[in-house]
Image: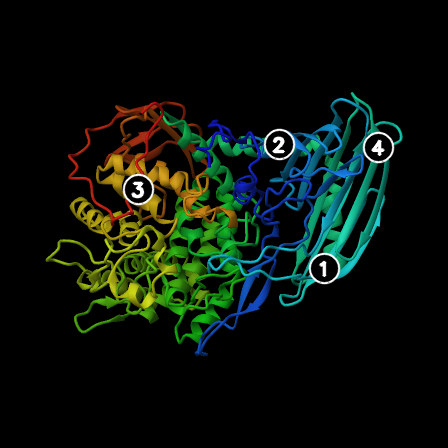
């Protein structure tokens, strides 16, 4: 999309210079605004035309039956689907009784601009009605990152050549008609009219609607109010109906006059409080925003983002497209997690209904590393949400005959919602992914109060699952059989290396935390014998290795399977899961997404450099990247083993996943984990950043920076223990600057160095080791070669 001439490459914004109705679905996603609590897709102000109306409140969903050909013990009983809640965006405009509709009359100009520094979406349109009346419409839209229940629009109309009679209808609408779903199972199930009317009212220049969600028993309130600035004679009237609140503004504008409308929308919802309490919550939020005013809301938004960018900004010299994409990615990841208090971070954020609005392991493994080092409060809130679901995970483990907690593969509220158990219930690695996120957060922040409470609880109960799920075999090895790793094309396998290594880390971390916080551990029933059993299991963890091939099998026996016939597979047959039975995929050597390769990124201590290079080459030839989660991981390992050209190609694929709609499903929402992977690719790939940790739980970062040809500079920052460490990499040297706080010890290409406050530490970058031949990929799955500026 950004390669289209309508999308110029700019460092701090995403701009569309002409409206293309054929790309409306994609642009509704990429221009979407969110704060992690409210999500507004970028539908046009006037509401139509649209591809997919989208207004979301994080955690609001409806239940739906899960289809089973045959019932089975332990199958989840119902699914959860995100719903389109009351839409507060529409502002309909009539010019001399003719509706402003971009499909009629003449749209002489149209521009939208998403500003990453202000968090505002700007739109300007000039339109000539079928009757020849011309007007300019300007709007600015925000979802507040500071006042989490508030979204707002500044809307202006002015005539261009003669007097016009203007009618503006500002609305809140429930139960909008949605398009029919496609046959892709990844697309959300569409529920018609999920909101049941409870109350409605109008007063002054505003209106409010309250609805219930029948199956999930949630209450949703949406209220709006306006500040109208127009010439004398401007009239304002508000009315309400069960599914509609409308404020109508009428005025005649002469040339040089302007109508300016500030629309504030407040949301509230709950699954436990009463209807009056939810309505009062929305009203109170709206009253606070109206008191703040539009200008101050914008100033708050800018200040919030200034603080974020001061640490998080990634700077690239030599690649303007990736520079733009990196900031877009960081902005969207922040939007997904900034105000998630008490809620999950869905795979699509709040940008669309893809994957039914569920959260997966994507959050802990891909998104939380970014937030941990750039916006740690958001990471803590996401982990606290997991902790609130612990009772459900304990119940689920008991149902499965296991001890500890079994966290769900996909969910909104905490119950398992996957109807396909081989890729759902069997993917136990999500327990270790959550534990790894806890360890990372505590190391990076030093938040011991978090570790003593939320962290310890999560670590203990996840460790207990591994101890009951695995067993010591006759040779003393600790085995974890019958599980599914990250690669969903190889399900229910024995001793998946990723799972075993992450479980090993989980067991060790739980033992260490319980030892440090013995009083809290005792309250959870942990004793010395249980801690010893965790350490024994971790020490004896079985990690398969194929001596004949000199590589690690993804899971025990994997390298003995028949290799998939890639040559006979056409481009139209990808993704494979939509064209071939899982039964066939499970029996072959074909990898949906990085699995063993991800293990090498997250557990680098478990592999030698030679093993990493051999493993990487072996799995490159098998990995088809039918998941948006894969390219960023392959990029990191390609950079580590010296394949910088290949790393460049994977970086571009990761960075342009949504901006170029590479998987042809951006219309259903952005790939938040892939967007997070852009940061990881740059920091862990070209920056060589790893969090190795120390026995005392303190954070130690190691870096092995190395730039590819064509990049002259890469700079990024990370927050560690409240200190900002900024790294600037050039082809010959890396400069480390600590902006505040006590000195920090890090590793630079394996050598310990100390960075002090305000004093740049410049370290030379050693020559790259000789890399072997560029690894090959399956036929038709070679990443597109990336060309940089001027190359």
Mark 1–mark 3 Cα distance, whole angstroms, equals 48 Å
- Residue at left 47%, top 49%? 665
- Disc nearest the viewer among 2 and 1: 2
**Are discs 1 and 3 less than 8 Å apart at CB?**
no
Label ID, residue 211: 1
Few, some or many residues within 10 Å of mark 4 (<14, 14–19, 20+): some
Q: Nearer the viewer, mark 4 or mark 1?
A: 4
Q: Position of residue 133 (x, y in %)?
A: 75, 29
Q: CA–CA distance between discs 4 and 1?
A: 33 Å
- Residue assigned mark 4: 251
* N-term-proximal mark, 2 vs 1: 2
Q: Residue furthest left?
A: 548
Mark 4 in CB contact with mark 2 (< 8 angstroms)? no
Which quarter of the rendered picture does the C terminus lie within? top left
Image coords of residue 256 (percent x, y)? 78, 20
> Label 3's element?
loop
The residue beneath circle 2 is: 122
Q: Is any atom of residue 528 visible in this view?
A: no
392 versus 776 height, above or below: below
Which element carries disc 1, helix, strand or loop?
strand
Is disc 3 surrounded by few (<14), some (14 to 19) or many (20+) residues within 10 Å?
A: some
Q: Position of 528 compared to 59: left or right?
A: left
* Residues at discs 4 and 3 in contact (Cβ within 8 Å): no
> Eyeballing the image, is 324 above or below 483?
above
| Nearer to us in this view, 17 or 468 | 17
């Amino acid at each position: 999309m950004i390669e289209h001439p309508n999308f110029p490459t700019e460092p701090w914004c995403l701009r569309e210079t002409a409206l293309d109705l054929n790309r409306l679905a994609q642009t509704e996603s990429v221009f979407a605004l969110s704060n992690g609590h409210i999500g507004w897709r970028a539908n046009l102000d006037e509401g139509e035309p649209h591809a997919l109306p989208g207004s979301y409140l994080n955690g609001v969903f409806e239940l739906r039956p899960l289809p089973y050909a045959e019932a089975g013990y332990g199958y989840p009983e119902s699914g959860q689907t995100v719903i389109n809640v009351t839409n507060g965006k529409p502002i309909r405009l009539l010019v001399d009784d003719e509706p402003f509709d971009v499909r009629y009359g003449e749209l002489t100009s149209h521009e939208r601009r998403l500003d990453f520094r202000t968090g505002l979406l700007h739109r300007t349109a000039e339109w000539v009605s079928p009757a020849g009346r011309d007007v300019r419409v300007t709007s600015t839209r925000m979802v507040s990152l500071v006042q989490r229940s508030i979204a707002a629009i500044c809307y202006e109309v002015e005539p261009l050549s003669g007097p016009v009679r203007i009618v503006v209808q500002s609305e809140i609408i429930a139960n909008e008609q949605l398009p029919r779903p496609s046959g892709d199972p990844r697309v959300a199930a569409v529920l018609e009219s999920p909101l049941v009317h409870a109350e409605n009212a109008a007063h002054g220049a505003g209106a409010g609607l309250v609805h219930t969600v029948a199956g999930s028993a949630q209450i949703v309130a949406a209220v709006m109010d306006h500040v109208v600035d127009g010439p004398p004679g401007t009239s304002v009237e508000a009315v309400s109906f069960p599914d509609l609140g409308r404020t109508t503004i009428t005025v005649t504008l002469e040339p040089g006059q302007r109508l300016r409308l500030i629309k504030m929308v407040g949301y509230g919802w709950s699954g436990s409080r009463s209807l009056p309490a939810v309505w009062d919550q929305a009203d109170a939020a709206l009253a606070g925003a109206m008191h703040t005013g539009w200008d101050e809301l914008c100033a708050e938004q800018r200040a919030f983002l200034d603080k974020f960018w001061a640490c998080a900004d990634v700077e690239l010299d030599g690649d303007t497209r990736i520079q733009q994409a990196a900031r877009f990615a960081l902005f969207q990841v922040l939007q997904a997690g900034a105000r998630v208090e008490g809620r999950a971070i869905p795979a699509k954020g709040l940008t669309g209904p893809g994957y039914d609005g569920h959260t997966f392991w994507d959050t802990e493994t891909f998104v939380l590393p970014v937030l941990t080092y750039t916006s740690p409060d958001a990471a803590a809130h996401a982990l606290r949400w997991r902790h609130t679901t612990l009772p459900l995970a304990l119940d689920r483990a008991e149902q499965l005959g296991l001890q500890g907690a079994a966290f769900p593969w996909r969910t909104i509220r905490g119950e398992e919602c996957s109807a396909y158990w081989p890729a759902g219930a069997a993917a136990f690695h999500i327990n270790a992914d959550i534990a790894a996120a806890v360890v990372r957060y505590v190391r990076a922040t030093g938040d011991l109060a978090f570790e003593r409470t939320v962290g310890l609880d999560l670590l203990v109960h996840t460790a207990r699952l591994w101890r009951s799920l695995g067993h010591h075999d006759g040779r003393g090895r600790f085995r974890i059989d019958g599980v599914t790793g990250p690669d969903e094309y190889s399900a229910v396998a024995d001793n998946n290396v990723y799972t075993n290594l992450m479980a090993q880390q989980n067991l060790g971390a739980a033992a260490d935390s319980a030892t440090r916080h013995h009083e809290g551990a005792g309250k959870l029933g942990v004793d010395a014998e249980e801690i010893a059993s965790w350490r024994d299991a971790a020490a004896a963890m079985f990690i398969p290795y194929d001596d004949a091939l000199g590589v690690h099998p993804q899971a025990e026996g994997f390298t003995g399977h028949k290799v998939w016939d890639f040559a006979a597979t056409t481009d139209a047959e990808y993704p494979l899961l939509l064209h071939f039975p899982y039964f066939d995929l499970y029996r072959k050597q074909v990898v949906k997404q990085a699995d063993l390769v991800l293990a090498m990124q997250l557990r680098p201590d478990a592999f030698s450099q030679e093993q990493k290079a051999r493993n990487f080459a072996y799995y490159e030839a098998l990995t088809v990247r039918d998941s948006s989660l894969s390219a960023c991981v392959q990029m990191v390992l390609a950079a580590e083993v010296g394949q910088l050209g290949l790393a460049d190609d994977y970086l571009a694929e990761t960075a342009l996943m949504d901006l170029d709609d590479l998987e042809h499903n951006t219309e259903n929402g952005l790939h938040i984990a892939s967007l997070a992977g852009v940061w990881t690719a740059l920091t862990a790939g070209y920056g060589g950043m790893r969090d190795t940790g120390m026995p005392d739980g303190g954070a130690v970062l190691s870096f092995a920076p190395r730039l590819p040809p064509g990049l002259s500079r890469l700079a990024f920052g990370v927050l560690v223990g409240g200190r900002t460490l900024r790294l600037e990499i050039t082809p010959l040297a890396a400069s480390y600057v600590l902006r505040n706080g006590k000195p920090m010890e890090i590793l630079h290409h394996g050598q310990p160095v100390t960075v002090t406050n305000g004093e740049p530490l410049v370290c030379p970058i050693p020559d790259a080791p000789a890399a072997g031949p560029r690894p090959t990929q399956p036929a038709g799955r070679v990443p597109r070669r990336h060309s940089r500026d001027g190359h």
